[in-house]
Image (spheres, helix red, strand yellow):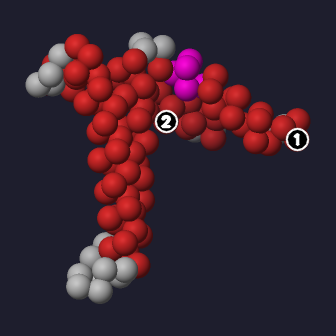
Amino acid sequence: MTDQATHAETTADLWNSIDDLWAWLEANRPADGQEGMLLRMLKLSEEVGEVAQAVIGATGQNPRKGVTHTWEDVQGELCDVVITALVALRTLTPDTREVFARHLARVTERSLGQGLS
């Protein structure tokens, strides 16, 4: 399989998984309407807090606890932030892929400019 084919398969798997997670959460959410949507957005803050906790634990910054996490734990928590953000975006729009792709292109162009190949 070529790198391009592997990339396309991975991208499809990513978005299919986000759609599946969104559908599962929609079917099992305790709050509906605007409250449910706002709680879904707030979940991001919880996940970011878990990244901070893992970094503090990986660096042993809490003298009472010492080293409690690994950098692999930090990686996992960062992945949870990305997944949670994409599910939150899916909650706002069914056009998640397109909205994300357009925004990523704008950020990339703004950051890297014309030097892109």
Camera sees residue 80: no
Majority secondary structure of the magenta segment?
A: helix
Q: Which residue is mark 1?
A: 115
Q: Residue at x 29, y 39 (%)?
A: 43
Secondary element under disc 2, as helix, strand or loop, is: helix
**Which range is magenta?**
97-101
Mark 1 and mark 2 lie on one chain; the one further toward the N terminus is 2
Position of residue 56 measured from the top left corner of the image (x, y, whole percent): 37, 72
Q: Is residue 68 left or right of residue 7?
A: left
Position of residue 105 measured from the top left corner of the image (x, y, whole percent): 69, 29
Residue 84 sits in which quadrant?
A: top left
Quadrant (top left/top right/bottom left/bottom right) for the N terminus: top right
Q: Is residue 67 left or right of residue 14?
A: left
Cα gap from disc 1 to disc 2, whole angstroms: 26 Å
Question: Who is closer to the viewer here, 64 or 11?
Answer: 64
Q: Amino acid at mark 1?
A: Gly
Residue 10: mark in rendering? 2
Pointer 2 local density, CA inside 10 Å: few below 14, some 14–19, many at least 20: few
Secondary element under disc 1, as helix, strand or loop, is: helix
Give the vertical position of 52 relative to 115 (above or below).
Answer: below
Whether label 1 touches label 2, CB < 8 Å? no
Q: Residue at x 34, y 66 (%)?
A: 54
Quadrant (top left/top right/bottom left/bottom right) for the C terminus: top right
Q: Residue at x 56, y 18 (%)?
A: 98
Q: Amino acid at mark 2?
A: Thr
Camera sees residue 46: yes
Is residue 47 found inside the magenta-colored segment of the image? no
Q: Residue at x 40, y 68 (%)?
A: 55
Give the vertical position of 72 relative to 31 (above or below).
Answer: below
